[in-house]
Image: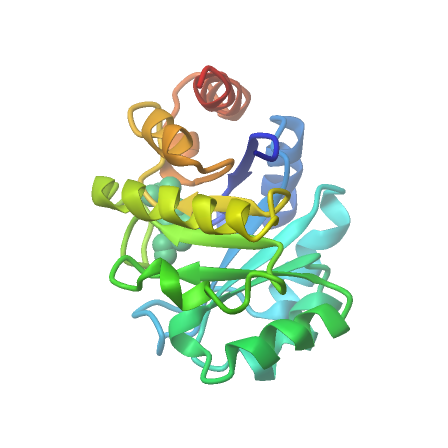
Amino acid sequence: MPRIEIAPSVLPADFSRLGEEVAALQAAGVDRIQWDVMDGQFVPNLTFGPDVIASARPHATVPFEAHLMVLTPDQMAAEYVQAGCQRLIVHAEACTHLHRTLANIASLGATAGVALNPATPASAVAHVLDLVDLVLVMTVNPGFGGQKYIATMEAKITEVRAMLDAAGRTDVDVEVDGGIGPDTIAGAVKAGANVLVAGSALYREKKGLAHAVADLRARAEAH
Ligand code: DX5
């Protein structure tokens, strides 16, 4: 299994100071930064355009990944790569031609991930395992931070990890996103996740971001 990575969601950050916020996340020891891109169509919320991400790019050196919770990822992919995202994660539910979409992301020079909403089966990625660098198992219904972790997704995390291992893709990340915190991270890692996206659990920690990141990492690596 690939190494444990803590990937904060910028969703709870202060949007009036995004440059400082990403610098603070990097200083806190995160491995990469996830931008929850929402178009108000695929999910009932609207967030970051590529120019917003581009404005934050110079303030951190850690990789950026765009979690494209959008209906039209093919139309947006190139702009988010140009904005400074090294990885693009598309939703299987939004891609009529997922195989082509993933190949297109690779042709842009980025690595590619597929996200699965809670009701979407792991089998949705069965025929693109050769094209993915990451599979994201959503542990909430996408659109907002601060939601409750859906523990029944742990069976899907295990199934996805097993599919990747059976296909010889043992280097591919299995990421989880939604409700990840001190009380839920162990279950997700035990199930097979190695990249943990957290938003509210980091920002609500009274001892600060660095403590929150170190605590989540320690809990994850203990399994
Ligand atoms: C859902 C979002 C959230 C966010 C993290 O669309 O993707 O999952 O990143 O949320 P919390 O606050 O649950 O860590």
Measuring from the top left, give residue 130's x and y in whole percent.
62, 62
Classify residue 50 as left or right of residue 117. right
Q: Residue at x 65, y 47 (%)?
A: 19
Classify residue 60 as left or right of residue 33. right
Q: Quadrant of the C terminus?
A: top left
Measuring from the top left, give residue 187's x and y in whole percent.
32, 29
Q: Nearer the viewer, residue 218 or 121?
A: 121
Measuring from the top left, give residue 33's x and y in whole percent.
59, 45
Q: In which quarter of the image is the N terminus?
A: top right
Q: In which quarter of the image is residue 142?
A: bottom left
Measuring from the top left, give residue 194's x and y in whole percent.
51, 35
Whether residue 110 is visible: yes
By what rule are the colours in the image chosen? rainbow
Q: Which residue is drawn at 62% across and 54% down?
A: 133
Classify residue 3 as left or right of residue 117. right
The count of marks equals 0
